Image: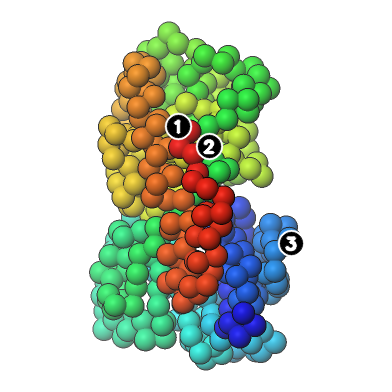
Amino acid sequence: MTNLPSYAVFAGTSGRCGLGVHTIDWVRPLAEAGYPVTLIAYDKDFFSAYLKDSPVRVVHLPLPDSGTFQETFRAWSRALKPYPAQRAVLTRGVGGSCSLSVLAALRYRYPRLYTIEHAMANLPQIAWGKPELEQSPLRTARNKLAAWLVDRSISVAECTRQSVIDQYGFPENKIVTCHNWVDVDRFKPDRETRARLRAEYGIDENAFVIGFVGRLVKEKRVDVIINGFAEFMASTTRESHLVLVGAGMTDALHELTSELKLTDRVHVVGMVSDTAPWMSAIDTLILASDSEAFPLVGLEAMASGVVFLAQPVGGIPEYVDHGENGFLANMGTSEQLAVLWLKISNMALDERLRIQANARRTAVEYFRPEVNLSRFLEALDAPEAGDLLRGKEGNNGTTHLL
């Protein structure tokens, strides 16, 4: 085990978002399998607190990711001298926000370079209505150079993989898809937690509770969700509540809730260290974004036995089968949201239980770590780590569906 290659992992996330959780999930078993791992947090050090009980060495090393090519390349090259490794992993791939100078500096310092694609290659254009970038000769040459520097890129969704190939001309044989995973032992139905959280917020056990978990930002269309909830409240006689969990524009959301006279029905919880309890407390999770890649929050909801409702964008259709384990629908207006929630809240008990059971089964059978995380580690050329995960599953027995 002592002869296993070492990894230098570069993570630029500044908070507990999907990218950060994803990174923590795979560096831990990589190190536990005997691979020496140094995680370099080049933004804020969000990782130390979550990896303090693991063999992963965490280093906080603020580094620039913009500036002239020469300035950025030199800064990264000088900073990486004390951290030798056989392999480097950049958690933001060529379809993400990294610059060519960063890729070049990493490839200059390390024999092998892997990147991870968490987003659609043209996601900023999709999310903010910007025109597509033109495929100029200079941009084409830049993309070819980036692809040459990377030994392998790992995409968390097939749609993301295809967008990187289409938008960046990335060679098909150098990028593989390894779907996200979800901890089905942590995200699962929990009746006691459900009752406790609801009681804390004055929510009746039989109330219909809609949840949003994620960044409370404009591109997630949280304001549309609140307006849709107001429309829904006007059309239902059932006691209903909306719970918003996450960090972001909380002040603006409080103001909107007050204007709509919904302060007793909309609960802006804010940032929490663990979202699993809230997944147990809600009945349905809403994701109304116009653009996504492969949102982990949907899998977390499904593993918790929650009815997941989202727009059919990005990689969401890769795990949601409409009408079978969740619902996909256009949510262009608040009125459309209200109609969808009315349908879900009025579902017959046997139909709701069928959807919830299918959602949980999808997460357990196809997206648990022992399946997808093992494949991801093998794509990083660390088969021992993948074998270790599968061995743990064999020793612990099969995860229960319910």
Element carrying mark 1 = loop
Residue 128 horizontal/vertical position (percent): 38, 53
Q: Nearer the viewer, residue 337 or 305?
A: 305
> Of the residues under marks 1 and 2, which one precedes in the sequence?
2
The mark total stands at: 3
The residue pinned by badge 2 equals 188
Q: Are marks 3 and 1 in contact (CB under 8 Å)?
A: no
Kind of residue at disc 1: Val
Q: Residues within 10 Å of mark 2 (few under 14, many from 20)?
A: many
**Callout 3: 10 Å neighbours few (<14), some, many (20+)?**
few
Residue 200 has which mark?
none
Q: Which residue is drawn at 52% across and 48% down?
A: 397
Query: Which residue sits at x=40%, y=47%?
Result: 365
Q: Quadrant of residue 392?
A: bottom right
- Which kind of residue does numbered mark 2 sit on? Lys
Q: Nearer the viewer, mark 1 or mark 2?
A: 2
Identify the residue at image location x=70%, y=72%.
57
Q: Is mark 2 on a helix, strand or loop?
A: loop
The span from disc 3 to disc 1 (Cα, nearest Å) is 32 Å
| Mark 2 or mark 3, earlier in chain | 3
Above or below, 244 against 364 in this view is: above
Residue 166 seen: yes
Q: Which colour scheme is used?
A: rainbow
Circle 3 sits on which residue? 52
Provide the secondary structure element on which disc 3 rests: loop
In the rendered structure, find residue 306 and report the number of the disc placed on it.
Answer: 1
Residue 238 against residue 170 in the figure, above or below: above
Q: Position of residue 243 (x, y in %)?
A: 55, 29
In the image, 151: left or right of 62?
Answer: left
